[in-house]
Amino acid sequence: NGINLFSQDNGSSLPKTGFTWPGAGFPTTANAHSHNDYEKKAPFTDAYAAGFGSIEADVFLEKGLLLVAHSKDQFDAARTLQSLYLDPINAAISKNGGRIYADSSRSLQLMIDFKTDGGTTMAALLEVLKNYPAITSTASVRIVISGNRPDVAAWNNLPPYIFIDGELEKSYNTAQLSRIPMLSTNFATYSKWNGKGRLPEAERMVISGLIDKAHKSGKKVRFWNAPDILNSWYAFLDEGVDYINTDQVAAISRFFEQLPDRSFTNPVPAYELYKPTYKNDGTTRPIRNVIILIGDGTGLPQWYAGYTANHAGLNVFNMHYTGLSKTSSFDNYITDSAPGATAISSGVKTNNRAVGVDHTGQKLELLPMIVKRRGMKTGVITSGDLRDATPASFYAHRPERSDNTGIITDLLAEPIDLIMGACPYSPSDSLFTRVKKQFSFYTSPSEVRETGKPVFVADPTAAKHMYDGR
């Protein structure tokens, strides 16, 4: 995914957004949950370095030790909850002056998934935590118990630093909810989606309902056994999932890092589209004007990006007839602006970097010449430099697009009645002395007057701000 564009839900076909971006800030790795973190190459270290908001460790009580493992065949007396998690967390708190992260806005949820009896495992954990007062006293670390949770009746007897991972399907009273910061459930119970394409609408509505239920209780949401690919991460954020369950620490870290550059929420209402009447469709009246509008470098992804950002509306999509042009250049599979525009202006493929000539360098007949024979006036207007490859392809004949002098020289021999754009020049330049003799020369559109001569408008300062909307 090169870019992901979100729009506020206005009843269109676009999806809703769980996060109001960018006003509320973009989600970060604080929204990531390192599932079975102990199985990573560097338990705790990688997820912590990436700023994860939640880290999970499965724990067995075995011969008095809290061993971190997925199953009993992985038991290793050296891999205890203390050595893999509590000790490094303690060290980080000491280093950061009492907080888990140097960034005071960040916190960490250590989710301990009990694989053995909840009551006895909890008793052993509380005994161990007596040796870590820095962890149990800081608000920047939250210990959350999952798996074989202690009996609900015993929750009131737990110290205030112990929280419970609630089960989304269950109902809890007010006192119980006070112990629950997050509600989790098995995604596969409600959907068979593999993360590719779009989450089926019927399943999405069920998932959305579960999320809404949790949020109305003031609780965060996590789905386990869920798709864990880039497309699913986007979908879960879009639905408002608070913690993205992942086994891919590095990949999801890059995803969150790049998210601000790949996402956009239009902060303003959609602009009102032009409402065409199509009154001339099907008629055979003579054509009075031919206007070619070129979005330089624009293709279907850019059109659809604009359509999405404008809340599912774009004037160009209201046109009755559209077509596609494959303009790979003569000498290259990937075109650049010069042969791309030359294909439009002449109907002939040419080499990359060539304007108005064929692949052998021979001059081509361009649209302005054809139109001029019909007694019509011709013009080239650009928001960029008028010597750039795209506008030059309608009046110049050069094998090299950067030949600015040659491009302006060709303009003097072509039937162009109006040319406008940025063009820094020197008043003493002999070439522009010729231009000023042949054209009515202006430096701003507001200066243009009818003189009977072709018009040349060259803003000498426009080049420095041609892309900032002026």
Image (cartoon, rainbow, N blue to C red):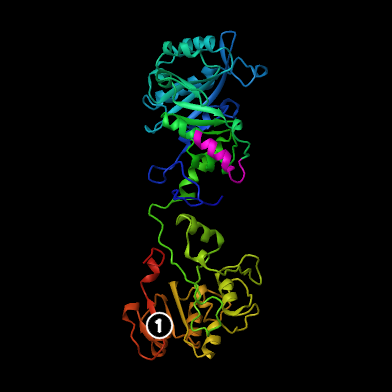
Q: Is residue 243 visible?
A: no
Residue tagged 1 = 456
Please name whichever residue, 200 or 284, is drawn nearer the observer in this view of the structure.
284
What is the x, y in percent for residue 304? 52, 58
Callout 1 amino acid: Phe
Using a 10 Å C-alpha cutoff, classify the residue at mark 1 as few (fewer than 14 neighbours), some (14 to 19) or many (20 or more).
many
The image quadrant where one finds the C terminus is bottom left
Q: Is residue 201 magenta?
A: yes
- Report the side of 211 relative to 323 (left or right): left
Count numbered badges in the picture. 1
What is the x, y in percent for residue 366? 56, 82
Report the span colored magenta: 195-209
Work out whether 174 lies above or below 258: above
- Report the side of 344 relative to 182 (left or right): right
- Report the side of 166 relative to 226 (left or right): left
- Report the side of 429 relative to 329 (left or right): left
Q: Which residue is painted at 50% across and 71% down in the image?
A: 294
Q: Which residue is painted at 53% across and 18% down in the image?
A: 81
Work out whether 273 lies above or below 266: below
Work out whether 71 lies above or below 243: above
Work out whether 10 lies above or below 295: above
Local secondary structure at mark 1: strand
Q: Main secondary structure of the magenta part?
A: helix
Q: Is residue 317 magenta?
A: no
